[in-house]
Image (cartoon, rainbow, N blue to C red):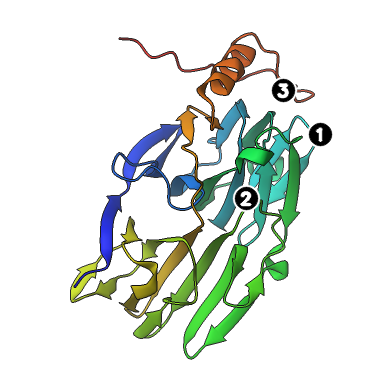
């Protein structure tokens, strides 16, 4: 009997001047554990005259996690942070009560051909941390726990799992694990993870209960205690999830909160440009008013 309760396919969505594959939120499954938003960025090629640019935009009530496979992105925020992220590293920005940031092509790549490919993830904050001061942490690739079981390579990007702890400073019990193999392999996550479990197939195929699942989709386990599957050679998947919150989370544009009034207040602040600014940057993303 299949242990897959929901299958979520990537849907093309515009982000700035860039098309992404939107995975979460999804109408049948708004969150998996505390994970509330996942975009698959690229792979996209840029000519020397083209750049990746997401101007100033705000967040509240969440942490953003950027993880790249190819390319580089320059992160700047209203705390004064300026950090280039490269493949395998983690940019972790906690918005808390409010932060503004931009994401752009670094200056040294502007006049060169380039490729960008990665994941952009939002993780909702527990209610007690929704109004924390904003913060930013960069964790280099060599700081992330990695291990091999048989022919399967594991990398713990965020949270805790399987006896390992990532240096990314999360706020609730969660996990994000990259799993890859060059040969066919049986994977059993039952009793090794906790809470809700989602499985994002980045590339390759997996087999679960006799059904082959291709890439660019999320499978949500109906029972975390029965989470097992077979990975085909050359497959990379991301297991993610954790303990869900007891309260509902609302999401409106870049704002997440357990109270709709908090989101309305943030919208008003952004429309009147009352968020902190980034020195030297003036272009910004306006709140997308929805026309009836």
Q: Residue furthest front?
A: 246
Residue 281 at x, y percent in the picture: 72, 22
Q: Indicate which disc, 1 or 2, sits on the residue closer to the N terminus.
A: 2
Does 172 sit above or below residue 153?
Answer: above
Instruction: Look at 62% across and 53% down and name the residue there.
Output: 172
* Among the two numbered marks 3 and 2 on one chain, the one whose residue lies closer to the N terminus: 2
Residue under label 3, please give it: 281
Query: 231 or 267, which is in the foreground?
Result: 267
Q: Position of residue 237 (x, y in %)?
A: 42, 67
Q: Quadrant of residue 143?
A: bottom right
Instruction: Tell me how far mark 3 sits from mark 2, CA to CA.
Output: 20 Å
From the image, which quarter does the C terminus lie in? top left
Q: Which residue is mark 1?
A: 80
Expressed as whole percent of the image width and height from the top left, the position of residue 198 reads 40, 60
Front: mark 3 or 1: 1
Q: Do the residues under discs 3 and 2 have CB atoms within 8 angstroms?
A: no
Q: Is 84 on the left-hand or right-hand side of 182?
A: right
Q: Residue at x 52, y 79 (%)?
A: 153
Which residue is the site of mark 2? 72
């Amino acid at each position: 009997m299949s242990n897959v309760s929901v299958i979520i396919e990537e849907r093309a969505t515009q982000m700035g001047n860039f098309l992404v594959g939107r995975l979460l939120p999804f109408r049948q499954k708004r969150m998996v554990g505390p994970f509330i938003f996942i975009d698959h960025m690229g792979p996209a090629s840029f000519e020397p005259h083209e750049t990746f640019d997401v101007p100033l935009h705000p967040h509240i009530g969440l942490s953003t996690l950027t993880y790249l496979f190819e390319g580089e992105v320059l992160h700047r925020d209203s705390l004064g942070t300026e950090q280039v992220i490269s493949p395998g590293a983690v940019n972790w920005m906690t918005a808390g009560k409010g932060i503004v940031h931009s994401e752009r092509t670094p200056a040294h790549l502007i006049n060169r051909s380039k490729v960008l490919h990665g994941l952009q993830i939002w993780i909702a904050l527990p209610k007690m941390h929704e109004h924390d001061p904003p913060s930013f942490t960069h964790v280099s690739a060599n700081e992330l726990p990695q291990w091999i079981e048989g022919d399967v390579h594991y990398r713990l990007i965020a949270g805790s799992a399987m006896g390992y702890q990532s240096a990314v400073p999360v706020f609730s019990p969660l996990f994000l694990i990259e799993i890859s193999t060059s040969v066919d392999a049986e994977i059993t996550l039952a009793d090794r993870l906790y809470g809700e479990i989602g499985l994002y197939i980045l590339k390759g195929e997996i087999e679960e209960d006799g059904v082959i699942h291709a890439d660019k989709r999320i499978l949500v386990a109906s029972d975390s205690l029965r989470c097992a599957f077979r990975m085909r050679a050359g497959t990379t998947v991301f297991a993610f999830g954790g303990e869900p919150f007891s309260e509902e989370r609302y999401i409106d544009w870049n704002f997440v909160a357990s109270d709709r009034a908090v989101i309305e207040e943030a919208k008003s602040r952004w429309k009147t440009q009352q968020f902190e600014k980034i020195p030297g940057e003036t272009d910004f993303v306006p709140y997308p008013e929805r026309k009836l």
